[in-house]
Each structure stands twice: as structure tokens, then as C-alpha cells.
Amino acid sequence: MDTPGALSCDDELRHWPTDEDQARAVQDRLRSSARLDEPGPEPGFEGTVVGVDVAYDDARDVVAAAAVALDARTRAVVDEATAVGQISFPYVPGLLAFREIPTVLDALGRLARTPGLVVCDGYGLAHPRRFGLASHLGVLTGLPTIGVAKNPFTFRYEPPGPDRGATSPLLDGDEEVGRALRTQQGVKPVFVSVGHRIDLDRACAHTLHLAARYRLPETTRAADALCRRALADA
DNA sequence: GCGACAG
DNA sequence: ATCTTGTCGC
């Protein structure tokens, strides 16, 4: 049963690039598939928000991914899954997705139910070619995705106001590619950008809701802890 | 050419 | 990302 316009995740994985030029070509080819015209799920929607993260052991060439599903309203952990694989791509700024996505997809596939939103470590639209990790994961899965990064990468921003919830534009030249968001008073902001099927306002609202107690969203914290454990046990 | 550069 | 002790503070 073919769906016109849809792309096959399996096919993309079979043709996973092995060098940087191929990888950039994949980003350029898939970029137009990212949907930026949907508002996306509203905070507190009925369903799960899933955090994904990856940990590496370069010496053993092992990568471990974790996917942790939280109730979108209560933030309670309702499911979690891990996957272990071989490191398939070096870390190259701008090509992070090729290092993380295969194992992340494996972990996501082991969840009991379909996520309503996936929160990635890193960027979506805020990317040199406007197709970061969150964009790529969204296009391959069809799921709404956002990127929440701890660093501004190469982009500029003015510090947001001191209060929780304050934002400022994350800029690539004159273009707003995301937002700096203060999730807690007195801490560095996080850097939010859209991936797939959600708008920036909602991406920030979800991030703020998920970061009720700490600087980083609970999804990120839970996935980070779990993938480290999975790596240690691998 | 050099440095910077999500994780 | 990862290598890594103690330490200041709630």
C-alpha cells in the first residue's frame, strides 16, 4: 500500500551515507519533507512525550540509545526502551543525525505505543542546512519532533530575561531559526528549534512544561540517564 | 589557511 | 559526547 509523497524509513536506512558529502546530499534532499505548517500537539495533550538520547563508547565502538515516554500532562514515566548498536558515523558538526538516528530508531520502535511528540538533544531547523537531528528524525518517523540543545551552536542570541519562560530569538544572520528559552530562573537558557509537524511557540511551551524543576526537560534527563545505564550494561 | 562547531 | 574530585548550597 503506497502512500504518495511518503518516504520509506527502511529505504533511507538501507542507503545510509558513509561519507560527509553523501550525508549533506541526504539533508538537502530530505529538507523539503519537514512539515513546518502544522501547529502540533498542544501542551498537556492526551498521549506521550518521548525523550531520546544516545551515549557512546568510542573505544568499544558501541552506541546506546534510550527512548523514555512520559505522560504529556503529568510527566510521569510510562514506558522506556533502549537499543545498542555500532557507531556508524563520526561526529561532524552539522551531521550529528547520521551518528545518532539508526540506534534511536531502534529504541523508538521498542516502545509500546506511538509517541505524540519526540524531544531530541540538539537541533531541528537551527542547522547550517536547516535540517538538524530533530528534523531528520521527524521526517523518517512522521512524528512531531522538537530539538532542545544545551549550546547555541554557531548561532547568535541575546540573553533572554531573567524569569522562567523568557525567550529571545536564536538567529542565523537575520533569520530566526529557534529560540533561547529560560527554563529556570538564574540558569543558562536552552535552545529550542522545531523539527517536524510543530510550530516554535508550541515547541517552547512543551519544553517549558517539561522543565518544571530543572534546566533541562524531564524527557532529556530521563533519556540521558537511561542510555548511560544501557551503555554501561552493554 | 585558521578557528569554531548540536552530541 | 567523554575524561573526572571535591565542593558549595538548598
Image (spheres, coloured by chain):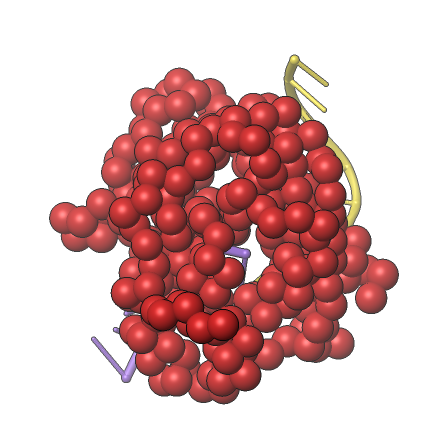
Chain colours: A red, B purple, C yellow
Residue drawn at (64%, 32%) of the image: A71
Q: Quadrant of the C terminus of chain A?
A: bottom right
Q: Is residue A119 above or below residue A3?
A: above
Residue A107, x across and y down, in percent: 68, 60
Q: Is residue A5 above or below residue A82?
A: below
The foreground one among A189 and A233 is A233
Q: Is residue A158 above or below residue C2?
A: above
From this viewpoint, is residue A213 visible? yes
Residue A174, x across and y down, in percent: 14, 48
Q: Quadrant of residue A56?
A: bottom right
The foreground one among A44 and A134 is A44
Which residue appears farthest toward the right when viewing the image?
A233
Q: Quadrant of residue A89?
A: bottom right
Residue A23, x across and y down, in percent: 41, 79
Residue A128, x across and y down, in percent: 29, 63
The foreground one among A209 and A73 is A73
Residue drawn at (53%, 48%) of the image: A118
